[in-house]
Image: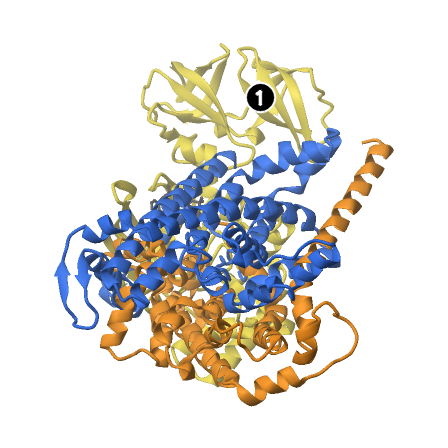
Chain colours: A yellow, B blue, C orange
Amino acid sequence: MAGIQLVGVNKRYGGTEIIPEFNLEIESGEFLVFLGPSGCGKSTLLRMIAGLEPVSAGQIRIGGQDVTASAPGERDLAMVFQHYALYPHMTVRENMAFGLRNVNVPAAEIDRRITEAARMLELEGMLARKPIQLSGGQRQRVAIGRAVVKEPGAFLFDEPLSNLDAALRNRTRVELARLHQRLKTTMVFVTHDQVEAMTLASRIVVMNRGRIEQMGTPIEIYRKPATRFVAGFIGSPAMNFIDAIPVAAEADCIKVRLADGTELQTGVPTQAARKDAKLVAGVRAESLTLDDASPVRGRADVIERLGERTLVYVTLSNGHSVVAQAHRESPVASGDLVGLHFEPEHVHLFDEAGLAWHAA
Amino acid sequence: MCICLMKPGLPGMPHKGAAMTTTLSALPAAARASSQPKVKGVQHWSNALFVLPFVLVYIALLVVPVVTGLWLSLNDVDVLSGDRAFIGLANFARLWHDDIFRGAIRNTFLFVLMTTPAFVALGLALALALNRQDRVGTALRTIFFGSSVLSVTIVTLVWRLVFMTDKGLLANVMHSLGLASINPLTSSALALPAIALVTVWWIIGLPMMLFLAALQQIPEEIYEAAAMDNAGRWRTFWSITLPQLRKTVALVAIIEVILQFQLFGQAQLMTNGGPNNSSRPLVQFIYEAGFQQWALGYSAAAAQVLFGLMLIGVALQMWISKRGQTQSGEST
Amino acid sequence: MSARQHAGRRMGDHLILAAVMVLALLWIAPLAWVFALSFKPNAFLAQHTDVVLGAPYTLKNYTDILGTSSVFRWIANSCIVSVTQTLLTLVLCSLAGYGFARTAFPGQKALYVFVLAGLAVPEQAVVIPLHRLFADLDLHNTYSGLILPRLAAPFGVFLMTQYFKAIPKDIEEAALLDSTPRWKIFLRIVLPLSIPAQATLGIFTFLTAWNDYLWPLISASKPDMYTLTLGLAATQSNFAQSEGIGYLMAQAVFAGLPIFVIYLFFQKHIVSAVAGTTVR
Ligand SMILES: Nc1ncnc2c1ncn2[C@@H]1O[C@H](COP(=O)(O)OP(=O)(O)OP(=O)(O)O)[C@@H](O)[C@H]1O
Ligand SMILES: [Mg+2]
């Protein structure tokens, strides 16, 4: 089990800088998820940790040792690839044994580890098969098994679930969580799927254009997104953003005038926020509910009934569209005029630099 | 790609990643391929060891001979005494005035003009007719392609027997039709066309297979859409199939030009260039000048002419390939 | 499409197929004729060549070949030359293809272009210098003399490089993480994965070597060193005063049969190798 440190890591391809300067301390035993939009450099980062991609500058340490110049095989890591990368001409057993034989693990030990991994991943009947004879989910389990038998200091995953269908993805996700609980080994997981990140991570690193946007537990990131980018990226449906300007402060909390002219009392402490002329108010659908008494009014145009709740897409009087949440059996119908209630303690304000201010 | 070094028998490309369970990354392949795991300069030079054996053979047996050949073409070489004298372009000047050489050039061009259209038209026609997945299709393809695997000496032996004066298969057929028999190989007018016929018979399989492969790339839906639009057989061929095959037609044509420029064995074995030099091709001229008259410099000069002509062909081929690629790139 | 049109189209399909079948019959007629007559006595053939079916039959033409000619020696030579050339080509081209496709070293790109330029060189442009070179090295009329020149053809390198490039990189990366040394990645991972390409290149090289004519004609002047292809040329050079038509026909059949059997056996591979050539 090993912690991983990235110190001033920089990556450029020719003239283009993909990762300007990256500093991160991954703790031993944690499940760390890199989350970010496509092309933000997640895979590059992971591959640099693995040694598959050289760093342009900076240092990578694993278990306290500088491995920046070490070959991939010397880093005591195992990686699970997006497309599995199983050796197609080897059986499942050979796939798992290959890496162990290369470092001269005794045959009996290899057998023991394979048997155990196969039991854990329910691959027992399949050890003699070739990858081509397995389903997608089984292949993915073999890829995980191949990593597990190495008993590495840390696991690296590059979007390992993105090739699976929805049901299988959920199941494998749970298996991975279970695996981490059992092994307690450091895991670094790359994804652009926020649900995977929220459910698996003990800590999430949200990335944008090669930089860290925010780092924290899933709940921290969900409750208190540090920037507008994070707020918009995490959560489904995406957070509503409404232009707002601050009006004379009453009491301790900021009051803003929304774009449609109505005023809104937030829970954001007055002294916390910079006095920017323009702000953006952000509120998630779950904190925006239907309330006929509210002065903020609009017309419901699309109703999505998800079973456990109902999403209502509302066009405000200024043409702005927001999504609110209603009770699962709410009688609201398309075309209805509705009022919207903002829960003040869940309204976020973003200044012009995109930084967030939250209710106390 | 070029197959000019090859006898008809032929090259192939792998089915990309056929054995793989995975697909290629969505990243640009070139970008990926260049980002090799290089760990701080280790292994740099040692990787060249992989290519070293081939490169040595290549330099010794191809590059050096090409250069030597160029140099020889500027010299007068006497094989017996081993004397050699630099004579500049005199060999080329002599070629220019050599009637036999000019005849050989003329024959070669005529031969290419006779065979290439036949390869394209017949190859395409056969491919269209045999583009079917049943046993009949397989059997017929086996027949039309089968002769390609025979060596030139077998093919010429068979056809010399067929063309035999009075007793050949051709003579028999003509007799039974009440015609006077002829042996085309003994007629200056018919010798070259006869060699062309034999050549088409021999290796029609290559263009046929190239067209078949291209036909199978055309998505079935297009034909279904055409059927919905009430397009008949000809209409479908002219407005659907042929436009999709444009690039393949061009490539098959150019490949055949390159291949047929190298005509040698058929002519040498069936007519030995005769009668009256009416069927002597360029390569046979090179062979005879070099290895029967031992005029090495002169022969090398003729070889440079062939080389030059083929370079034009290869350049054309690459140009068409490139154009085809960008076209298909745009459409996807 | 109306039912009438549909029926018309079906008719057309049948007509086309019938026409192609007739053409196919014409196509095999020369071979069938030679094959059938090769079983007739020479004396009979001196009189008639128009009686294809029916007596008399004889195997004498074939026993004559087996008894008198050097045909076995030539077959052996062809086998030695073709097999050796195929194996050496596979080794050289696999190594070079891997080096070009999957490793990095200074000057790699330029070297690859330099090698591919060789695709444009026709064999005939180098036979004279090669002949002199091999004469100086005293390699004419040896197996090495027959085998070596074609090893320099860059086509195989091109083919293997293309193929290796298409193998997903993450498999190799997985092997790197499994502490696999370079040579072992090549031998244990990449090479087994390239078997389809090896088969294509192997079959192609074998056929080319087996059917090669110009270079053996130039290099092998002693009948003992003839390949089968070359030997057959030698026997037909004195076509007129040969031992008889039947004997010649039997020779054609005898020489063609091995390669034809190989063709029928590997047909799928040969055809798919050729079909894959669709020059992209
Ligand atoms: N070999 C390369 N040469 C040049 N640019 C590259 C190379 N590899 C990756 N990049 C660029 O680096 C950036 C980051 O790529 P990376 O693969 O790390 O993205 P990612 O966050 O993993 O995205 P995804 O979620 O789509 O996998 C991208 O903009 C990509 O175009
Ligand atoms: Mg990625």
Q: Secondary structure at mark 1?
A: strand
Q: Residue C84 location, x and y as percent?
A: 42, 77
Q: Nearer the viewer, residue A162 or B163?
A: B163
Q: Residue at x 48, y 72 (%)?
A: C237
Instruction: Decide if residue A131 is on the left or right side of residue C17.
Output: left
Query: Residue A71's quadrant in the figure?
Result: bottom left
Residue A141 rendering spot, x and y as whole percentages:
56, 63
> Visible in this render: residue A221?
yes
Say which quadrant the N terminus of chain A sits in: bottom left
Q: Is residue C5 toward the left or the right of residue A40 in the image?
A: right
**Figure quadrant of the C terminus of chain A:** top left
| B40 left or right, relative to A53 | left
In depth, the one of A92 and B330 nearer the eye is B330
Q: Position of residue B298 (x, y in %)?
A: 25, 58
Foreground pick, B206 / C110: B206
Residue neighbourhood size for the residue with mark 1, other residues' Cα within 10 Å, grouped as few (<14), some (14–19), many (≥20):
some
Residue projecting furthest to the right: C3
The residue depicted at 45 percent of the width and 41 percent of the height is B325
Marks counted in the figure total: 1
The front one of A199 and B242 is B242
Q: Quadrant of ligand 1?
A: top left
Task: Indicate the position of residue B159 as horizontal and vertical percent values.
Answer: 58, 63
Residue shown at 65% from the left, 79% from the top:
C42
- Residue C253 lies, with reference to residue A212, above or below; the image says below
Q: Is residue A259 left or right of residue A352?
A: right
Which chain does tag 1 point to? A
Q: Amino acid at mark 1?
A: His
Using the rendered image of the protein, determine whether residue A3 is visible from the camera's viewpoint: no
The answer to whether B206 is drawn above or below residue C80 in the figure is above
Residue at label 1? A341
